[in-house]
Image: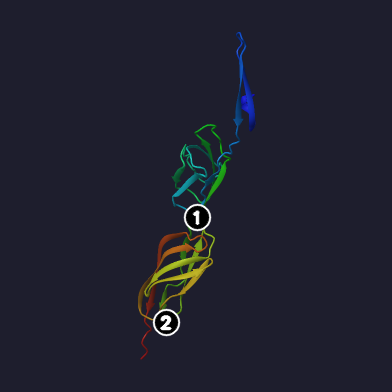
Amino acid sequence: DAQNAGPGTYYIEAEYTASPGCSTIEEVVVASILPTEVTVTSHEVCEGDAVTVTATPLTPGTYDYIWTIGNTNPGVIPNPGNVATFTFTPDAAGIYTYSVQVIDRGAPFCESIPTNGVVTVNALPMASITAPAITEVCLNEEINLEFTGSLGSGPYEFEISGPSGNQTLTGDPSATLLAATGTVGTFTYTLVSVRDINTNCSQAIGESIDITVFDLPDVT
């Protein structure tokens, strides 16, 4: 069975059926060709980031690419077809899996073993300001503002804009800021953005709160 012959040396005899019945013998060597290996990239990104996945055969040549997309994805990876590289934007946080197999376009058309890849998509953190019960205070009266992160794994870094400029606070999941009350007036504190320190994913927030400081009454 020539199609199922293993590696080795074989001899094929051909004989004429007509007179005088001459024959010839040819030597055929069947070599063992190992299929190429293929690597595929894996990534860890933030929600909303584009991801480029690339398959790379370790042996130079011309190949067809067969992608298999995992069916437990939190979102959708469109099957890219017969390409070595494709880009997609995950539509939800979670784990995306895929595998790729390459087939050599040249004889004997060897197929690689499928290689798996994974894209881990981290959620964007959220944050909010917890308003104090009283936002109108007297001069030099103490008042605290609390900033709380969520949706990420924490700890969180909060960028805050206030009367003295921008500053950052860190907390897991919350951080507290002592508001400045040494000057009379109304002062705005804005939670500009939050960053999950563990995943390095960040998001603009833009939530604000006003603190009003009143002068002390005169005593005569």
Please, what secondary structure does the residue beneath circle 1 have? Answer: loop
110 above or below 50? above
The residue most toward the bottom is 220
User: Measured from the top left, where is residue 182 in percent x and y?
Assistant: 39, 81
First in sequence, mark 2 or 1: give its number: 1
Residue where numbered disc 1 is placed: 123
- The mark found on residue 140 in the picture is 2
- Residue at the image position 53 percent from the left and 63 percent from the top: 154
Crowding at dot 1, Cα within 10 Å, few <14 / some 14-19 / many 20+, comes out as: many
The residue nearer to you, when weighing 41 against 34, is: 34
210 above or below 116? below
- Residue 154 visible in this rendered orientation of the protein: yes
Whole-number angstrom distance, CA of label 2 to CA of label 1: 40 Å
Crowding at dot 2, Cα within 10 Å, few <14 / some 14-19 / many 20+, comes out as: some
- Residue at the image position 61 percent from the left and 14 percent from the top: 22
Q: Image check: 4 left or right of 139?
A: right
Image quadrant of residue 17?
A: top right
| Discs 2/1, front | 1
Q: How many marks?
A: 2
Please, what secondary structure does the residue beneath circle 2 have? Answer: loop
- Quadrant location of the C terminus? bottom left
User: Measured from the top left, where is residue 55 in percent x and y?
Assistant: 50, 44
- Quadrant location of the N terminus? top right
The residue nearer to you, when weighing 40 against 126, is: 40
Looking at the rendered structure, the kind of residue marked 1 is: Ala
Looking at the rendered structure, the kind of residue marked 2 is: Asn
